[in-house]
Amino acid sequence: KERLWRIIFLSDTSGAKAFDVVLLWLIAGSILVVMLETVKSVEVFHRELLKGFEWLFTILFTIEYSLRMWVVRKKRRYALSFFGIVDLLSILPTYLEIFLTGSGHLIVIRVLRLLRMFRILKMGHHMSEADFLVSALKASRSKIAVFLFAVMAIVSIEGTLMYLIEGGREGTGFTSIPQSMYWGIVTITTVGYGDIAPVTVIGKILASVMMLTGFAIIAVPTGIVGAEIFKELSPVKMDGRKCANCQHL
Amino acid sequence: KERLWRIIFLSDTSGAKAFDVVLLWLIAGSILVVMLETVKSVEVFHRELLKGFEWLFTILFTIEYSLRMWVVRKKRRYALSFFGIVDLLSILPTYLEIFLTGSGHLIVIRVLRLLRMFRILKMGHHMSEADFLVSALKASRSKIAVFLFAVMAIVSIEGTLMYLIEGGREGTGFTSIPQSMYWGIVTITTVGYGDIAPVTVIGKILASVMMLTGFAIIAVPTGIVGAEIFKELSPVKMDGRKCANCQHL
Amino acid sequence: KERLWRIIFLSDTSGAKAFDVVLLWLIAGSILVVMLETVKSVEVFHRELLKGFEWLFTILFTIEYSLRMWVVRKKRRYALSFFGIVDLLSILPTYLEIFLTGSGHLIVIRVLRLLRMFRILKMGHHMSEADFLVSALKASRSKIAVFLFAVMAIVSIEGTLMYLIEGGREGTGFTSIPQSMYWGIVTITTVGYGDIAPVTVIGKILASVMMLTGFAIIAVPTGIVGAEIFKELSPVKMDGRKCANCQHL
Amino acid sequence: KERLWRIIFLSDTSGAKAFDVVLLWLIAGSILVVMLETVKSVEVFHRELLKGFEWLFTILFTIEYSLRMWVVRKKRRYALSFFGIVDLLSILPTYLEIFLTGSGHLIVIRVLRLLRMFRILKMGHHMSEADFLVSALKASRSKIAVFLFAVMAIVSIEGTLMYLIEGGREGTGFTSIPQSMYWGIVTITTVGYGDIAPVTVIGKILASVMMLTGFAIIAVPTGIVGAEIFKELSPVKMDGRKCANCQHL
């Protein structure tokens, strides 16, 4: 049982590594099946095959979940942990769908499908390399929050201005302030769908100002996160305290 | 009175912090109401409710403004300060609207609505964390100005060139130089609405050059602001004077 | 004459600074006139006014050019220098247009208009702050060239692949390899007009790969230019040689 | 033979440099010909000319390949090396096309054309400056992989959510989860074609969240690659070991 625990929860032995790799492929496969089920042309011709695979993956994940529950010591803590819930959500929807085959509970089936897509989060079990990303984002969390607030403030003011200028026109996209703010976010993030675009001269000038603002402001998160990552990556930490007994960076 | 001043203007006591949080939610709520008033489907069914909330927020902000005016020592200086004006603009429009309910002063109502949206700037009272953002942008102000001028120069020349090449065609979007410059800004900031796009071969080649220029030039503000933020964030300031009595970074 | 030279060519006295400011406004005004001349709705009603302003600016720039020629010692060198040519091109087109008023030399007038837009480059006379931008770009010139070549190579290969996959279809935008490469540049720079977009499944997968590549590759010029600007901005130059006699950064 | 090897494989003598430059122009010309062959309006009028050039380039590249095979010592190793295969693929397609002129093997001709476009990779022979780019990307390879996985996870979850919300509607672009994920990639990379865009209110809010996420997340690769490039470019390597005997950065 101890050995099984090592294989399932750690990845320091060859057996554990093999287990990790197999599980990653199973997850990838199961996500592919969920995705293909929504593609009409595929679903019509291979419905039975997809259902078969779905059940295969569900049974394998059920075995995995049972094993995890069996080998782990603090069962309750695991069951309520983030990955415990993710593991449960990976198997539950398929079982629930049995009770829905009769009538067309379209929305429920859709939600269950979404829950099955959360299997991708299971991959987090096996991704210790992602720590640096999480820690870099965590360290700059409060700064990014302030930044996002600043963006929202700019978008609110600009959105209202655009609604003021473009709003009265026939066939305009700026039908309300929330709509204008949606346009503002699309523009300031430089996505630019083009479904809503200014048509008046003043509107275009204002939009240009907004774009150039976005151009200058995109530098801020880059600077924040970039500086954090740079600190993480540099061989000797750029930390004043540590350097008291050294003469280099 | 002194204690009230501490609560309202500072945020170092628990009472002051509670005051801050309550006010932030009030501001958020009042902005939501202004936004929803412009959405037709919501406005038609909940007009009375929205109006009620609007008056609730206005009265609360009026109390807040009165309190601020009462506790502050230099009344005139506060009234004419940035936040003093913002606080006044947050309450004035609702009172002014009373005189306009009769006939349809559509444009005036729109402008008043905009003024009410400025309430978002009230949030600045309670955002001391935003200082680093402001100081980083301030430090790189003159450099960003030069950068924006350089972008405008590129956009002017490229816009004129595109007008020269694409302008004569039927159904073209490049109807004038300002229009071409608008396209240039949309393109160089990588927004790319697609409402104006080149159709001739030379136009497309020129546009490609423009995009790649934008790609290379976007690095400039990132470098400027990023370097500033990096300096702000590093634990020991990268300042030559300070390091005279230390041997590390 | 010596004093005039100081005023015109340098900006260290108050007279010279005033001269600079006046000229900057003149240039801005003259560019505005050129731009407005191409806007139909403005041009129809204010043709005479615009023409008047155009001549005013031309005469003022002619006086400026004459003064520069008069006070400068090495006349030939100035006349053939970059700014000498720009100054000449700022006044020549208006004089040339006199000979074209009769018949509709549309294309020639357009080209002359373009030449007048080059007046914006005159502003470079008065922009000593732009040096840091130029030097940062210059220092990373060869690296940006390599980067642009790499982008072109990716775009060529991807463009050909997309032409292979999407090319045969009815109503496709991928009608030839150059067209596909244009799409590739629009996509990799994240401009995304949407005038050409993949419709097949494999095309969409390939396009996704391209976008994510662009997402990762945009970091390269940012890193290059950013590092250069960071070096320029840091108070003590990060240069190994200089630090031989100092103990801090 | 030794001297010829120096000229062809190295670039330290003037003869070798001339050889490099000539070959770069030949490659550029040959790629231009392949590209123009797919442009209908050019192909119809200059078919014979293009074919002539194509054969000229093929013969020249054949001579080059023969020379390389002749002068290199380990022939087998060169033939199977990356550049050996690229060199072979540069000449083979033209010879293969002789056997296909009779009937319309359209797809085969297309694939051969693609293979000829790979000639652009031949340029890698002569681009020693690109090393820094490759090494910077290589050093951050594993981190970029983790980053791309994180992006894919976000896109999967968001794509499924959007399919849930927007999927049931008439004329929607979100017809399946893969389609929604394609939209997600187009949005998070800020390309934004606009061929698929949300129409419901909740969809637009979710899309806004996605865009702002992308805005914050674009900073991550920039930070990673930027930090690597910064380390490559700094005159004294920021490496703890080296600085043991120095007191500056």
Image (cartoon, coloured by chain):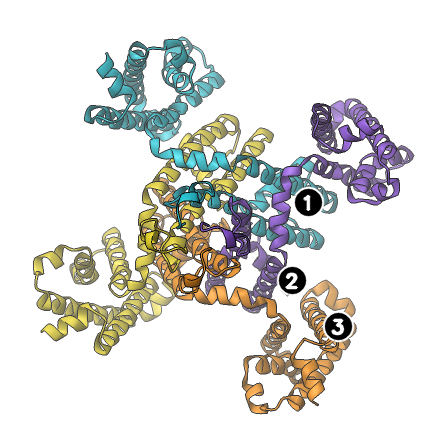
Chain colours: A orange, B yellow, C cyan, D purple
* Residue C176 seen in the current view: no
Front position in the image: C57 or C152 = C152
Q: Secondary structure at mark 1?
A: helix
Q: Amino acid at mark 2?
A: Pro
Under mark 3, the amino acid is Leu
Q: Is residue A4 left or right of residue C74?
A: right
Q: Are marks 3 and 2 in contact (CB under 8 Å)?
A: no
Residue at label 1?
Answer: C158
Dot 1: chain letter: C
- The kind of residue on which mark 1 rests is Glu
Viewer-proximal residue among D149 and A161? D149
Query: Contact, CB < 8 Å: mark 1 with mark 2?
Result: no
Q: Point out the image quarter for the N terminus of chain D.
A: top right
The percent coordinates of residue B149 (x first, y second) are: 37, 36
Q: Residues within 10 Å of mark 2 (few under 14, many from 20)?
A: many
The answer to which of A88 and A139 lies nearer the viewer is A139
Number of marks in picture: 3
Above or below, D230 relative to A125? above
Q: Mark 3 falls on what kind of element?
A: helix
Residue matched to label 3:
A50
